[in-house]
Amino acid sequence: MKMWLQSSMARPKFSNPWHHEDHGILDILKWKFKIGPQEQPLIPEAPDEPAAVVPLKPEKIREAPAKGWRVAWLGHASFLVQGCGLSILIDPVFSEFCAPFEMKSFRRRAPLPISPSDLPRIDVVLLTHGHYDHLDLAALKALPGEPRWVIAEGHADWLEKRLSKKCQEVAWHEKVELAADVTVMATPAQHFTARTPFDRNRGHWCGWLIEGGGCKVWHAGDSAYCAAFPEIGEFYGPIDFGMIPIGAYQPRKIMKPMHMNPEEAVQVFSDTRCRRAVGMHWGTFTLTDEPMQEPALRLRREMGRRGLDLDAFTAEPIGSQWNVTAQV
């Protein structure tokens, strides 16, 4: 066996520390080839249409606010977060396909709300992990200027070779300074990562907690529900604004170890003591079997079932913006 292949097939460096039931290759094959009974959506009448898109006007985001934060959803898990004079991109994915090559099943179904060339100067790029729907190499290479690159542990060497830029790795619970009085910390998540069949879990996965100007803005990353979230709420909450995944969850037997469903997302919202949150990881690409609009409908239904404020955790059009201010 070639040494590079033997090395890459060695025991993965990173793993999830919580017990969970993982799926096997047979389960995946049955799902992909639709062998046997198939899981049906909970809301079968939900439209299989992408999220609505509202244009994001360049003049509205040209300058980062000096006080508070402004958050704009660019689709899927991509966000522009601006505050304290900084413009931060999280998981920017701008390509037509979230795959290593053009695959119809991974084609973008919702357009971008803004041309990437109309984005403001980016100061920092935060990357949660290496999956193609979160790390878009073409998008990263096209970013102008000299942003600071911050990524989950284990990815820096790979990314530096392709960007010819210095990248900073951050471990779970590690906090780094982005500017005076602005920090970012990697928060735990339950997931996995791979770019090829031979590099599974050679890098880590995380969320990002940005603190500055008296505010906490949190991107949960790509994650299943796990024991990390009550701890995040206990040690780092309350959180002023959260970006929490709500889609790509069906069939549950396959997706439960890696993706939360909307009901679990509401539990994350409560666990982490978010004051306000928006759903992400839905409405942009068709990654799994649920109708594209079902995550938004189930989110609202679960918030109502629990008697929570329906406006506190919502699913909004791509291109939406939110202002986050410090709590007095």
Image: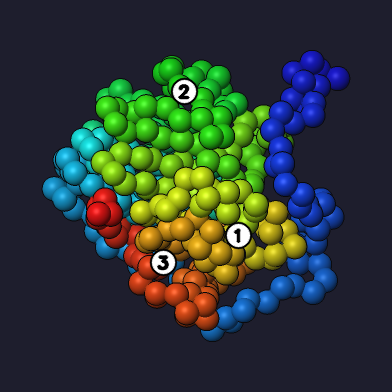
Q: CA distance from mark 1 to mark 3?
A: 15 Å
- Does residue 64 lie above or below 167 as drawn? below
Q: Which residue is mark 2?
A: 168
Q: Residue furthest front?
A: 328
Q: Which residue is mark 3?
A: 313
Quadrant containing the C terminus in the rendered view: bottom left
* Coloring scheme used: rainbow
| Dot in front, 3 or 2 | 3
Q: CA distance from mark 3 to mark 2?
A: 32 Å
Q: Which residue is mark 1?
A: 260
Q: Which mark sits nearer the N-terminus, 1 or 3? A: 1
Quadrant of the rendered image containing residue 140 = top left
What amino acid does circle 3 point to? Phe
Q: Secondary structure at mark 2?
A: strand
| Dot in front, 1 or 3 | 3
- Does residue 101 lie above or below 298 as drawn? above
Quadrant containing the N terminus in the rendered view: top right
What amino acid does circle 2 point to? Gln
Q: Are marks 1 and 3 in contact (CB under 8 Å)?
A: no
